[in-house]
Image (cartoon, rainbow, N blue to C red):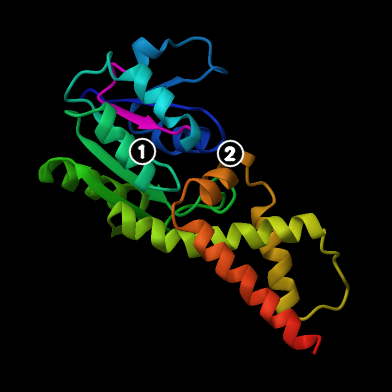
Amino acid sequence: MKKKTVGIIGFGNFGRFLYKHLNPYFQISVYDKSVKKNTLKSVIKSDIIILAVPVSSFENVLKKISPLLNHDTLIVDVASVKVKPTILMKKYLPTNPLLGLHPLFGPESGKNGIEGLSVIYSPIRIEKENLTHIKDFLKSTFKVQLKKMSPEEHDKQMAYVQGITHFIGKALNTLDLPKFKDETKAYTKLLEIKQLLNRTSADLFDTIEKENPYAKKVRTKFLKTLEKLENKIER
């Protein structure tokens, strides 16, 4: 049986991570400025297109591909935020099937395997039968846990789950926490957070903090809480 074709647009850390996991099951082509052998026109002829580009580049990419796409090509967005990509895909791709996916892992957190890890999905515009096939594939092949969320619900939750975590992680890396021979478990956990997030790309950090419409409110609340705590200590 002929393998379905998948085109990945964007071949950064996460694009390469996707390629590694999907390559055994699909015929994959990649479009990126770093990949010279494929053209955008050839890649978007695939049955499924996965957009693995920074959200800041999303609109420009959609403008380029929209005139070239077949109307029945499934477009899958794997960004760490969902509200903005959903709005843009609906605007520039008014007829294509659309699915939002957010694996809550990446090259670092998934380096030892992704079985049991979580994937959030947002069915934007997709037939129930096709969605069922995709869900069954993800569950049976990769043994991941699937959770359905609307784009708004996703971003509200991720403002805490990722927004605060990566904000703290960036601060810990800037602070350059030292390693000691004698540490409490709590301090060891801080070092683990630092290590886990120290390879976060600038694009991913900016997406999580700048492109999530709810992230700034959560950060502001966090910083005000720290300020109140500091003032209480210094009384």
Mark closer to the observer (1, 2): 2
Q: Which residues are magenta?
A: 44-53
Please rate how many residues cluster around mark 1, counting C-alpha atoms within 10 Å: few if below 14, some from 14 to 19, many from 20: many
Is 22 inside the magenta-drawn segment? no
Predominant SS along the magenta part: loop
Q: Position of residue 132 (x, y in %)?
A: 17, 48
As drawn, 215 above or below 30: below
Question: 10 left or right of 83?
Answer: right
Q: Position of residue 208 (x, y in %)?
A: 52, 50
Q: CA distance from mark 1 to mark 2?
A: 16 Å
In-front residue for pair 103/144: 103
Q: Which residue is mark 1?
A: 77
- SS at badge 1: strand
Q: Position of residue 191 (x, y in %)?
A: 73, 65
Residue at the image position 54 percent from the left and 17 percent from the top: 33
Question: 190 left or right of 129?
Answer: right
Q: Is residue 185 visible?
A: no
* Residue type indicated by callout 1: Asp
What number of labels is visible?
A: 2
Residue at the image position 34 percent from the left and 54 percent from the top: 120
- SS at badge 2: helix
Q: Which residue is mark 2?
A: 203
The residue most toward the right is 181
Residue at the image position 74 percent from the left and 61 percent from the top: 172
Q: Name which quarter of the figure residue 230 lies in.
A: bottom right
As drawn, 129 above or below 219: above
Q: Position of residue 72 (x, y in %)?
A: 16, 25
